[in-house]
Image (spheres, rainbow, N blue to C red):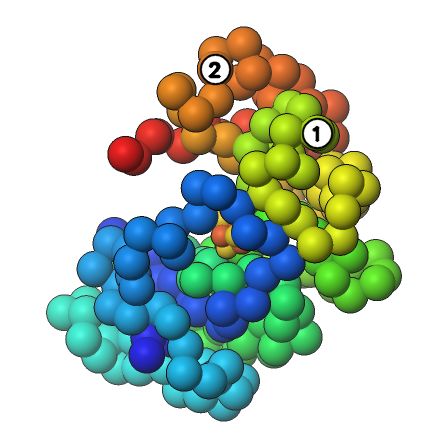
Amino acid sequence: MVIVYPVRTGLYVNLTNRCPCACEFCLRQNGPGIYGSGNLWLDHEPSVEEVIAAVDGFLLRGEGTGRAPVAEDSDGTEFTELVFCGYGEPTERLDDLLAVARHVREIAPNLPIRINTNGLADLIHGRATAGDLKGLIDTVSISLNTPDADEYFRICHPKFGPESYAAMLAYTKACAAVVSKVVMTVVDEPVTSKENQKKCRAIAESLGATLRVRPFES
Ligand code: SF4
């Protein structure tokens, strides 16, 4: 199983396969991995110690990357970002994610840290969670997917029900108050029409975020 994997200049961390959604477009339906990651289906959720050991393998020893280690020269890392992403919703393990992020801050203080999320952390944990990210996470990327709450429920099937869309928007706004960069994402045409992209941009900007239109990959 793969806990940490490089994609281009990013180092990606695969914490969990749990997710409260069942999106109809989820890449997990296409195969066991993406971008040459190897198998992202976990036979167990790695402990914080296991994740840190895997991260250290890449960042401190350059294992399996052909890249220079970064610890003694963190400005010189060939990795430009560490990203919590993987085959599941990383905020399912929020405390463990933060523990790993704290470690990364120590060994590579200049390496930006991003979370790719569905934005439902508050519903997962039953409390406001954005404040936990303050001072530790540089970028939060939240899947907006559509400007329409009903359509969101129809295509993402969040287990928390139709109120999930509003919770995701509220989470975005809360993140924008404490994290320097908050991005909302949609997939380009034909998934998201230009008209809907325009609406999504307006929603993102009204919450203090920017919109990123991801390329469509068939
Ligand atoms: S939120 Fe992400 S991981 Fe979860 S089902 Fe949707 S696309 Fe897949």
Q: Nearer the viewer, mark 1 or mark 2?
A: 1
> Residue type at mark 2?
Ser
Q: Nearer the viewer, residue 194 or 50?
A: 194
- Left-right relation of 50 to 179: left
Determine the residue located farthest toward the right in the rendered image.
127
- Marks 1 and 2 close (CB-CB < 8 Å): no
- At 63% across and 16% down in the image, what residue appears? 199
Residue 150: image tag: 1
Q: Residue at x 34, y 30 (%)?
A: 216
- Work out whether residue 82 can be spotted: no
User: Which residue is painted at 83% across and 57% down in the image?
Assistant: 128
**Label 1: few (<14), some (14–19) or many (≥20) C-alpha neighbours in 10 Å:** few
Disc marking residue 75:
none
Q: As drawn, is 99 to the left or to the right of 79?
A: right
Is 159 located above or below residue 98 in the figure? above
Q: Nearer the viewer, residue 145 or 136?
A: 145
Secondary element under disc 2, as helix, strand or loop, is: loop
Label of residue 193 in the image: 2
User: Which secondary structure, mark 1?
Assistant: helix
Farthest residue, direction top: 195
Question: Which residue is at a point 35% across and 69% down the rendered structure image?
Answer: 40
- In the rendered image of this protein, does residue 104 appear above or below residue 210? below
- Which of the two residues, 32 or 64, is positioned nearer the viewer here? 32
Could you tell me residue 13's position as x and y percent? 43, 67
Quarter occupied by the N terminus: bottom left
Q: Local crowd at mark 2 within 10 Å, few (<14), some, or many (≥20)?
A: some
Where residue 113 sits: x, y (%)?
51, 58
CA separation in Å, label 1 and label 2: 16 Å
